[in-house]
Amino acid sequence: MSNEEIRGWLVGRLPQDWFEGAPEITIDREEITVVGTLAVPDLPDTASAAERAAAVRGRVKGFREDTRDKRIEIARELEHRTDKKVAWGVTIDDQRVLFT
C-alpha cells in the first residue's frame, strides 16, 4: 500500500466520533503513528489549573480504555496489510500523549 492508500484507509476505517477532525498520520519505514485530537472537557470558567489538568488526564485515560479493543482490531488489520507496526496517540489542550 502507498502512503496515500494507508492514510485513506485509516480515515475511512476510524470511527467518526473518535477525534475532532482528521487524525495526523505519520508513516515511516517501520511504523504508522495515528494521533487524533480530543475535545477539551467542558469546565466552568472558575475551574482551577489543577482541575483542568485532571479533566484532561481523565479524558485521555477514558479514550484510551474505551477504544482499546477497536484500536487493536484496526492496528492488526493494518499491520497485516503493510507489515508495519501501528502506534496511537492523542493531542488535547496543547499536550501530546502517545500510547505504548
Image (cartoon, rainbow, N blue to C red):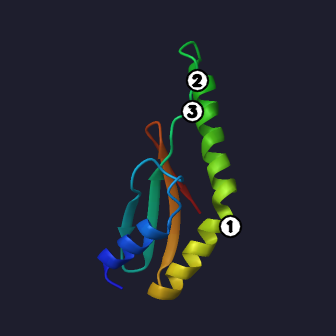
81 in relation to 46, above or below:
below
First in residue order: circle 1 vs circle 3: 3
* Closer-to-camera residue (38/27): 38
Q: CA distance from mark 1 to mark 3?
A: 23 Å
Quick one: label 1 or label 2, which is nearer the N terminus? 2
Question: How far apart in space, not on screen, are marks 1 and 2 (Cα)?
Answer: 29 Å
Residue, disc 1: 69
Q: Is residue 29 above or below residue 53?
A: below
Which one is in front, 25 or 20?
20
**Mark 3 vs mark 2, CA separation in Å:** 6 Å
Identify the mark at residue 43; answer none if there is no mark: 2
Q: Residues within 10 Å of mark 1 (few under 14, many from 20)?
A: few
Return the x and y of residue 89 as percentages of the image width and height.
Answer: 51, 56
Q: x and y percent of residue 82 in the render?
A: 44, 85
Instruction: Name the disc covering residue 41, or none.
Output: 3
Is the N terminus in the top left, top right, bottom left or bottom right quadrant?
Answer: bottom left
Whether residue 7 sits left or right of residue 86 in the image: it is left
Instruction: Tell me the amino acid under the disc marked 2.
Output: Leu
Mark 3: few/some/many CA within 10 Å (<14, 14-19, 20+): some
Q: How far from the left and from the top, in percent, is residue 100?
A: 59, 63
Look at 62% across and 32% down and name the residue there: 55
**Which amino acid, mark 1?**
Asp
Q: Is residue 11 left or right of residue 80?
A: left
Q: Secondary structure at mark 1?
A: helix
Asked whether the beta carbons under mark 3 and mark 2 sit within 8 Å of each other, the answer is yes
Name the residue rendered at 44%, 75% in the picture. 31
Quadrant of residue 76 in the image? bottom right
Q: At 68% across and 67% down in the image, what residue appears?
A: 69
Residue at x 34%, y 78% (from the top left corner): 5
